Amino acid sequence: MKNQKGFTLIEMMIVLLVISVLLIITVPNIATHSSNINSKGCEGYIKMVEAQVQAYKIDNNAIPSFDQLQTDKYLKNTGSTCPDGKTGLVITSEGAVLTEEEFNATGQ
């Protein structure tokens, strides 16, 4: 009798079953958390822009617009939207950075 090394069909099917179960468990979980991930990314971007607005204010004694922040190299060409590409941002006259929804809700 030959000494053959390898997997049997049953062993391969068990491995594929385990992998399939793990994928079935994890993929829906990741999909439901994508909106949470996007909101956290937007919150982080807002804080970074607020810091750059304060740095510009200290250097120039004025509240900047997004165009001024980009022109003077305080921000890269990311624009006035969050990383999700959907949420617009506004710099208020006091230097706070708000989403367009928050800005419209305050009535400014």
Image (spheres, helix red, strand yellow):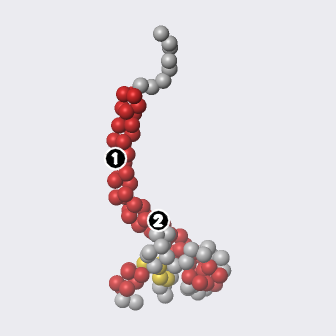
The spot of residue 10 in percent (x, y) is 36, 28
Local crowd at mark 1 within 10 Å, few (<14), some, or many (≥20)? few
For label 1, the SS is: helix
Residue nearer the viewer, 75 or 54: 75
Q: Residue furthest top?
A: 1
Disc on res. 59? none
Residue 68 visible (yes or no): yes
Q: Quadrant of the C terminus?
A: bottom left
Residue under the image location 38 percent in, 64 percent down:
35
The spot of residue 38 in percent (x, y) is 43, 65
For label 2, the SS is: helix
Q: Which of pointers 2 and 1 lies earlier in the amino acid sequence?
A: 1
Residue 13 placement, left or right of 3? left
Disc on res. 24? 1
Residue under the image location 36 percent in, 42 percent down:
20
Q: Residue furthest right?
A: 72
